[in-house]
Amino acid sequence: MAATPVADWLPPAPPGAVADAVTLICLPHAGAGPGGYRPLARLLLPRVALRPVRLPGRESRVGEAALPEATAVVRALVPALVPQLRGRFALWGHSMGGYLAFELARLLEARFGLRAEALIVSGCPAPTSPARAALPQRSLMDDDQLWSSAAELNGIPAEVLGDAGLRALLLPTLRADFAVFETYVRRPGPPLGCPVHAFSGQDDPEARGADMAAWGEETRADFHHATLPGGHFFPLEDPAAFGEALVKALTAPN
């Protein structure tokens, strides 16, 4: 099987970044692609260059089947990603993307000797949080329930909600992505060597402050936890506020 071109996984870096900018690899939330992160990307320039990953099953890759397991996603991504990590880089994952970013950070350290400047997680309970067991199992819902449940989290753009054709196209990817989130199990291994920054939404029912604070167990370096206004999608609800927090986390002196 031919390798997927790098450009399919990782759209080009945004113009306008300074020479020593931190490249922030973003693992998006369930069902999402790079498009929803463009407003935030503009706000992070020039000191941070946001590069959201385009996973199978969305945008230009909508004809590909989404992968329903975290390790499979990361292993498929790595061959395209590693050659791009030539300078300063950090990893950020939101919701489902948090577990993908965490597994990616572990793999890059263990197999390639590549240590991110930071792992950033938002809207994603720590792998060891007992609260995970109480979260809805959306991947097991019927289509109507799954669509409604995702809509209640504000995870589906308004222009998509009432479009039956887009719904039929997106549901398989959404279901596979929720399976990634729900079935993720942390494999044994040492804590990360990079700092971890965890961000909570004040009104997020999916990842409360205590659930996010447990991410501190996953690093032997510094850990920081902050709560920002908003619900589950607080990074996109107020990209200016989250962008300011991101830039501060990635550029503050150690």
Image (cartoon, grey):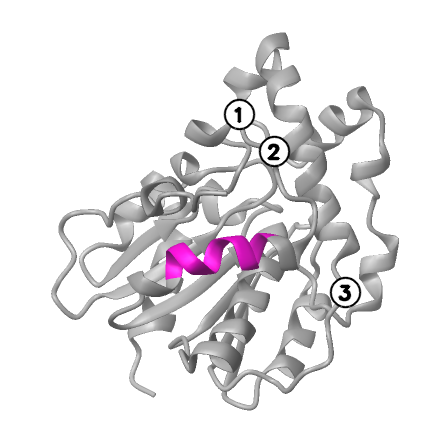
Residue 95 showing in the rendered view: no
Labelled disc at residue 65: 2
Q: What element carries label 1?
A: loop
How far apart in space, not on screen, are marks 2 and 1 (Cα)? Answer: 7 Å
Labelled disc at residue 121: none
Residue at figure coordinates x 43%, y 74% from the top left: 118
How far apart in space, not on screen, are marks 2 and 3 (Cα)? Answer: 22 Å
Residue at figure coordinates x 60%, y 9% from the top left: 165
Query: Given the image, on which type of amino acid does mark 2 rest?
Result: Ala
| Residue 153 location (% of width, % of height) | 66, 37
Query: Given the image, on which type of amino acid does mark 1 rest?
Result: Gly
- Binning the other alpha carbons within 10 Å of mark 1 as few (below 14), some (14 to 19) or many (20 upward) gives few
* In the displayed structure image, the side of residue 30 where residue 119 appears, left or right: left
In which quadrant of the rendered view does residue 150 lie?
top right
- Binning the other alpha carbons within 10 Å of mark 3 as few (below 14), some (14 to 19) or many (20 upward) gives some
Query: Given the image, on which type of amino acid does mark 3 rest?
Result: Val
Between 74 and 252, which is closer to the camera in this rendering?
74
Look at the magenta stretch and give its main secondary structure. Answer: helix
In which quadrant of the rendered view does residue 26 lie?
bottom left
Total numbered badges shown on the rendered structure = 3
Query: Magenta segment range?
Result: 73-81
Q: Is residue 115 a member of the stretch shown in magenta?
A: no
Q: Which residue is labeled 3 in the image?
A: 185
Mark 1 or mark 3, earlier in chain: 1
Q: Which residue is labeled 1 in the image?
A: 63
| Residue 254 location (% of width, % of height) | 34, 88
Residues under numbered marks 2 and 3 in contact, where contact means CB atoms less than 8 Å apart:
no
Residue 24 showing in the rendered view: yes
* In the displayed structure image, the side of residue 99 where residue 27 appears, left or right: left
239 vs 109: above or below:
above
| Residue 67 location (% of width, % of height) | 64, 43
Residues under numbered marks 1 and 3 in contact, where contact means CB atoms less than 8 Å apart:
no
